[in-house]
Amino acid sequence: MTEKKSEVLQGTLDLMILQSLDSMGPLHGWGIARRIEQVSEDVLFLNQGTIYPALLRLEQQGWIKSEWGVSENNRKAKYFQITRAGRRQLAKEVDNWWRIAGIISRILPKPE
């Protein structure tokens, strides 16, 4: 039996992108997507139609910034980096995540 890849819950993608950039430093979009897949042990899959609109939205909000560079395979790539405002937002998002996770854990039954 093959395991089904999970979809990213709405609202969590920004958190995962910001955390990836905070922990790994500047990455290009493909690298961010692969990092999230790797950490999820290949349960999550992010395609270009998912990751790039999120990166654009985060950049417009001032939480990340970008600059062009050359990737490890010698191709032109846009590298993204978290900003100070992005770090402040990340802290808020992490606090909110744990608050919501606590609420959900009180609602759901404990596994047997």
Image (cartoon, rainbow, N blue to C red):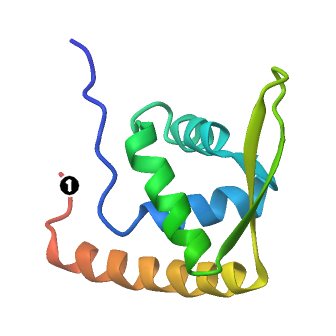
Describe residue 87's horizontal placement relative to residue 6 as left or right: right
Q: How many marks?
A: 1
Describe residue 59's horizontal placement relative to residue 14 as left or right: right
Outermost residue toward the top? 1
Residue at left 25%, top 28%? Answer: 4
Place of residue 66 in the rendered image (x, y in percent of width and height, measured from the top left): 74, 60
Seen from the viewer's position, the closer of residues 51 and 66 is 66
Per the image, label 1 sits on a secondary structure element best described as loop
The amino acid sitting under disc 1 is Pro
Seen from the viewer's position, the closer of residues 36 and 79 is 79
Residue 57, relative to residue 16: is it above or below?
Answer: below
Place of residue 91 in the rendered image (x, y in percent of width and height, measured from the top left): 62, 83
Place of residue 106 in the rendered image (x, y in percent of width and height, measured from the top left): 22, 79
Dot 1 crowding, Cα within 10 Å, few <14, some 14–19, many 20+: few
- Picture quadrant where residue 47 is located: top left
- Picture quadrant where residue 64 is located: bottom right
Residue 68, relative to residue 98: is it above or below?
Answer: above
Q: Identify the residue position indicated by label 1 in the image.
A: 111
